[in-house]
């Protein structure tokens, strides 16, 4: 999976969630009807989407376009679904999906 996102210089450009944001999101994962969901308020979702879009825009002005959000495995699917619903074009991978031999560069963090 990692190879699809590595740029021409052989580097995977990633962004992360700030640790406190990642922990807050993990604490909001709840099981409902046999399905794990992240229970965020509309305000939290909006802040997350706006923070993502703002960071992406900043990176694009620096010439960095092919970026990936790296998150805890328990969040990957849920955050990817939020991006899909709000039209955010950003790949979401979990730490477990990263190729351990890949060179990567952390370009920023999202706070929500």
Image: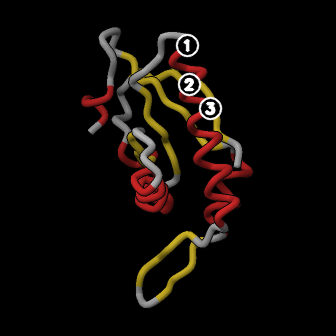
Alpha carbon separation for disc pair 1 and 3: 11 Å
Label 2 belongs to which residue?
57
Q: Is residue 40 above or below residue 14?
A: below
Label 3 belongs to which residue?
54
Q: Residue furthest right?
A: 20
Occupied quadrant, residue 97: top left
Q: Residue furthest bottom?
A: 33
Looking at the image, residue 32 sits to the left or right of residue 10; the answer is right
Label 1 belongs to which residue?
61
Mark 3: few, some, or many residues within 10 Å (few <14, many ≥20)?
Answer: few
Q: Residue 77, image x and y in percent?
A: 41, 59
CB of mark 2 within 8 Å of CB of mark 1?
yes
Residue occupying the point 47% across, 52% down: 86
Mark 2: few, some, or many residues within 10 Å (few <14, many ≥20)?
Answer: some
Q: Secondary structure at mark 2?
A: helix
Q: Is residue 18 above or below residue 54?
A: below
Q: Secondary structure at mark 1?
A: helix
């Amino acid at each position: 999976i990692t190879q699809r996102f590595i740029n021409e210089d052989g580097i995977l450009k990633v962004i992360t969630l700030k640790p406190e944001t990642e922990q807050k999101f993990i604490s909001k994962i709840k099981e409902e009807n046999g399905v794990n969901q992240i229970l965020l308020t509309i305000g939290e979702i909006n802040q997350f989407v706006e923070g993502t879009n703002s960071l992406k825009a900043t990176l694009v002005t620096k010439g960095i376009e092919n970026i990936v959000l790296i998150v805890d495995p328990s969040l990957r699917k849920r955050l990817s679904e939020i991006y899909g619903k709000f039209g955010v074009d950003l790949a979401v991978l979990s730490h477990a999906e990263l190729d351990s031999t890949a060179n990567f560069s952390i370009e920023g963090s999202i706070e929500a």
